Amino acid sequence: MNSVLLFALIVIFGIVPFGIAFLRIIYKKTIVFKIGLVIFLPSMFCTIVAYAVGYYGLWSLIWAVPLCFAVLMLSNVATKKYFQRPIVRLREKIDEMGRGVFAASKSETKHKQDEIGDIYRSFKNLAVNLHNTALFADAIANNNFEHEYQMASEDDELGKALTNMRDELKKAKAAEKQQAAEQEKEAWTANGIAIFNDLLRQETSNLEAMSRTFISKLTDYIGVVQGGVFIINNDDPEHVKYELKGAVAYNRVKHNEKEFEVGIGLVGQCAYEKAPIYLNEIPDNYMEITSGLGEANPKYILLMPAIMNDTVYAVIELASFSKIDDYKVNFLTKISDALSSTISMVKINASTAKLLEESKDKADMLAEQSEVLKQSFEELRATQEDLARKEAKLRELEQRYNIQREEDEDE
């Protein structure tokens, strides 16, 4: 009995601690350490049991076999805990990834520091990265180009490729948006040109009516709060003026003139320079806009000359509280060409009508003079005929007188 106990004590307190320490030093944080313990500890127990059976004889197998079986069961439990269950969880995780499920489970626990744990963590990181990739792809599909992709590392080639793809798609989306905006501006410009060309074609008889209709629709279409059209008056070539013929919400305070000579004021300066004037610093009290909410000064003023054949036929003046976009300025340039053509045609028509009226008056006067001359001619002819009759009668009297005288002389 003392020999068996001594042997057990030597194994338990000598060989077993030494073996565990040896395995821990050599295979620390590896699965080999756990495998070694599962094999080493039951082996030491079986060694003690074998020594006891050899000491007491075969009859001791009655208690030795159940005890060994219990130790084997404990070894089986340890094997399942340290090997089978982690492998099963690893397989389940791989199956989830195979089904396209990458999100980590909230019930997952911390794994041991061994090869199986390392493999599991690697798969978990892979699943997290794939999950982030799926979220990133979904964000891109929803046009969310501001979504940031979480790089797995500095060497994440897939992450770099996806980030580059997002940046290129973002640029393409921006380019597409810009192109759509440009197309919208072009459509707006084309539609406006059609509207105003049609308007100017219809209003060709009355210059003031055309000016009022034109500036009313123009301010509404461009989206400004105030506008006016100054039309050329070149009846006196030495003093060419531009007169206000049409206006919307027009209330000049400081410069309340309704006509400007070339070179005088902003309107006259625009006509002199034959170039647009765009101001974003408006002189105080230059212009006010009155509404039901009170009075306010505009922040931007645009003057556009309407030129044809180097002649400024009109100056368009617009005032706004906000900046007038460049495409609207370009649109106004095209509209001003049509306006100058219309004004030129209206003036030509008016001049032609005036000449026709003058020609008609002259024709009537000539006709009247012709009738007077005709009557005078008739009277003159009648006078001449009367004179001819009188002259013939005088000649006859003269002949009679000569005959009578000759007769008297013969006697």
Image (cartoon, helix red, strand yellow):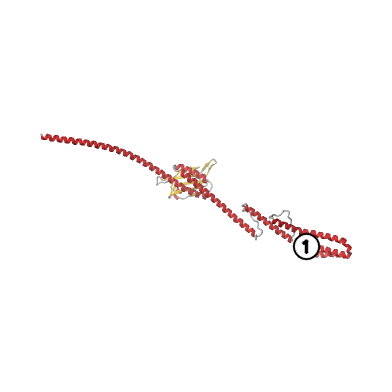
Q: Nearer the viewer, residue 136 or 325?
A: 136
Position in image of residue 237 (x %, y %): 40, 46
Location of residue 112 (image quadrant): bottom right
Position in image of residue 88 (x %, y %): 74, 57
Image position of 141 with respect to 250: above or below: below
Image position of 9 with respect to 246: above or below: below
Location of residue 372 (image quadrant): top left
| Circle 1 residue | 35
Position in image of residue 382 (x %, y %): 26, 36
Please tell me which residue is depicted at 78% across the width and 60% down the height of the picture: 79
User: What is the quadrant of the C terminus in the image?
Assistant: top left
Image position of 403 with respect to 348: above or below: above
Asked if residue 181 can be seen in this view, the reply is: yes
Please tell me which residue is depicted at 46% across the width and 41% down the height of the picture: 209
Mark 1 residue crowding within 10 angstroms, few (<14) / some (14–19) / many (20+): some
Position in image of residue 114 (x %, y %): 74, 61
Number of numbered discs present?
1
Q: Is residue 355 left or right of residue 95?
A: left
Kindly identify the amino acid type of the residue bearing the numbered disc 1. Answer: Ile
Please tell me which residue is depicted at 36% across the width and 42% down the height of the picture: 359
Image position of 122 with respect to 225: above or below: below
